[in-house]
Image: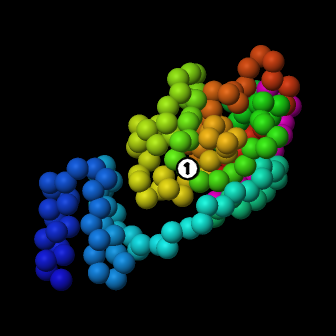
Amino acid sequence: EQKHIALIKTLALESENGTRLNLPNKVIVSKEYDYIVLSIKKPKKEVASKKFELGKQNIFGNMVEIKKTKNTDLSKLSGLFFDYDKLPKNAVWRTKQTGDMFTKFCGGTKKLKDYLIDKKIPTRIRAELPVLADGNNILLILGVEISDQLKVDENTKTICFMKQN
């Protein structure tokens, strides 16, 4: 309706980043930095977790391939790479939760929420973004960054690299 178009125009021109507008038929309009995004409201998903494994796999709708390599020429690897031996045995894939902390590559710890805001990851994506976690300690954010805790260094024996398909 015309009133909805007026609300969207106001959202685009006068509202702050992250502002959302709920329209009829489960339509959500969001202001995400320089964009106006229209989406359909999805039912809230149950928090699931998945054990870390090597190989090709589907991680919450994201097709990834995770491989070990002894190749230390990092310029030949595409995607995210990390020290496989530093990975805790109980690490699991899940989505973000309250209290998650992330140690930025090259130092400094932040709340995961604040880190994703700094990286300008839109709110609608943040909620479903897979992370590799050990409790509330975030080790890897799929497609975004690895934690400083997994970085490859001079003592690394086995490099693991991950690429999204």
Nearer-the-camera pick, 6 or 161: 6
- The answer to whether residue 131 is left or right of residue 117 is right
Answer yes or no: is residue 63 visible: no
Helix, strand or loop for the magenta stretch, by majority:
strand
Number of marks in the image? 1
Q: Looking at the image, which residue is at 28% across and 75% down?
A: 23
Q: Looking at the image, which residue is at 62% across and 47% down?
A: 131
Q: Is residue 37 above or below residue 23?
A: above
The three-letter code of the residue at mark 1 reads Gln
Q: Where is residue 153? Give x, y as percent.
A: 74, 20
Q: Is residue 132 above or below residue 77?
A: below
Give the colour scheme of this rendering.
Answer: rainbow
Nearer-the-camera pick, 127 or 152: 127
Nearer-the-camera pick, 107 or 62: 107
- The answer to whether residue 152 is left or right of residue 53 is left
Q: Is residue 83 above or below residue 117?
A: above
Image quadrant containing the N terminus: bottom left
- Residue at the extreme top of the image, as rendered: 154
Q: Which residue is mark 1?
A: 97
Image quadrant containing the C terminus: bottom right
Q: Secondary structure at mark 1?
A: loop
- The answer to whether residue 70 is left or right of residue 149 is right
Q: Where is residue 41? Give x, y as percent.
A: 42, 72
Q: Where is residue 125? Give x, y as percent.
A: 47, 56
Q: Quadrant of residue 140?
A: top right
- The answer to whether residue 128 is left or right of residue 15 is right
Q: Looking at the image, which residue is at 48% across and 52% down?
A: 126
Which stretch appears magenta? 62-72
Magenta stretch holds residue 70: yes
